[in-house]
């Protein structure tokens, strides 16, 4: 699945760019269905030979101009302490920028398909347990229980909170060590079945890099898993929109 997605979108040529630091795919589970046609990659904008040309080639002129209205300075005058990501959710593209010098870990994004801006903020590690307690009370017990079995709070490196007008909350969890799917596959699939009873096979060779859990305005849970080909890559950032 991983290889097929990157071949489909001709990603390999972009991953050869020296500034590209990570790439991953994701699977999103909602009450309406399961989406597997999702990928993202991140790069250091100041190391691109020609960032506007790169973005135009990848996104097309119309999308590039749309992103330019939201990230004009970041595209035309990128800084060394900024990091960019491009995500595709099966429908359209989203551009992310992390601002490491302003507010550590703060990320802004614009999703063309949703025509919406989003903000991601890093949660203080001192309140990680509060996030887990909130989810324990908000999620169906089987889903929360399985989640805690493959990613308990003690194994969580970073938690991002995403502000979304469509959700009561969205949290993205990064493991301290990316576990290989083959060791947690049953737990991953069991948690996902609480959201959608349909199932798809997961690639045993992949590594889990992020988990996103969202709760919609009508209290419906959503879930997304993010996978990479390696246990660790040089830069680890949150990925496409949950």
Image (cartoon, rainbow, N blue to C red):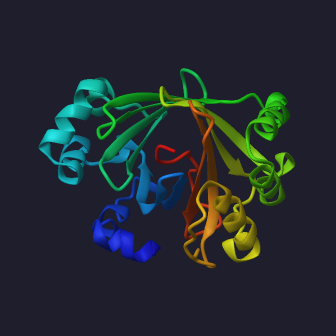
Query: Which of the pair 97/33 is nearer the observer?
Result: 33
Q: Residue furthest top?
A: 102
Q: Residue furthest left?
A: 61
Against 61, is 10 above or below? below
Q: Quick one: quadrant of the N terminus?
A: bottom left
Position of 72 with respect to 46 (left or right) is: left
Please say whether residue 106 is visible from this viewpoint: no
Residue 74, position as x, y percentages in the image? 34, 29
Residue 240, position as x, y percentages in the image? 46, 47
Residue 163, position as x, y percentages in the image? 54, 27
Task: Please count the marks in the image.
Answer: 0
Query: Which of the pair 164/82 is nearer the observer?
Result: 164
Q: Residue at x 30, y 41 (%)?
A: 113
Against 8, is 176 above or below? above
Against 37, is 130 above or below? above
Q: Residue at x 53, y 51 (%)?
A: 30
Q: Residue at x 57, y 70 (%)?
A: 199
Residue 111, by quadrant, is: top left
Q: Residue at x 82, y 53 (%)?
A: 145
Position of 26 with respect to 49 (left or right) is: right
Please say whether residue 173 is visible from this viewpoint: yes
Residue 217, by quadrant, is: top right
Query: Which of the pair 183/133 is nearer the observer?
Result: 133
């Amino acid at each position: 699945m991983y290889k097929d997605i990157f071949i489909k979108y001709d990603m390999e040529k972009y991953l050869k760019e020296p500034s590209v630091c990570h790439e991953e795919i994701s699977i999103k589970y909602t009450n309406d269905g399961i989406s597997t046609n999702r990928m993202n990659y991140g790069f250091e904008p100041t190391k691109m030979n020609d960032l506007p040309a790169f973005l135009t080639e990848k996104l097309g002129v119309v999308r590039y101009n749309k992103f330019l209205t939201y990230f004009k300075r970041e595209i035309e005058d990128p800084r060394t302490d900024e990091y960019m990501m491009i995500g595709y959710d099966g429908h359209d593209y989203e551009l992310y920028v992390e601002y490491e010098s302003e507010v550590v870990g703060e990320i802004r994004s614009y999703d063309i398909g949703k025509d919406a801006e989003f903000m991601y903020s890093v949660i203080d590690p001192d309140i990680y347990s509060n996030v887990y307690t909130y989810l324990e009370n908000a999620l169906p017990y089987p889903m929360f229980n399985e989640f805690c079995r493959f990613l308990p709070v003690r194994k969580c490196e970073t938690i991002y909170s995403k502000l979304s007008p469509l959700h009561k909350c969205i949290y993205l969890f990064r493991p301290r060590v990316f576990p290989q799917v083959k060791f947690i596959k049953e737990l991953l699939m069991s948690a996902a079945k609480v959201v959608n009873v349909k199932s798809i096979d997961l690639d045993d060779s992949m590594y889990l890099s992020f988990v996103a859990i969202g709760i919609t305005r009508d209290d419906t849970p959503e879930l997304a898993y993010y996978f990479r080909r390696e246990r660790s890559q040089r830069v680890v950032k949150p990925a496409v929109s949950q």
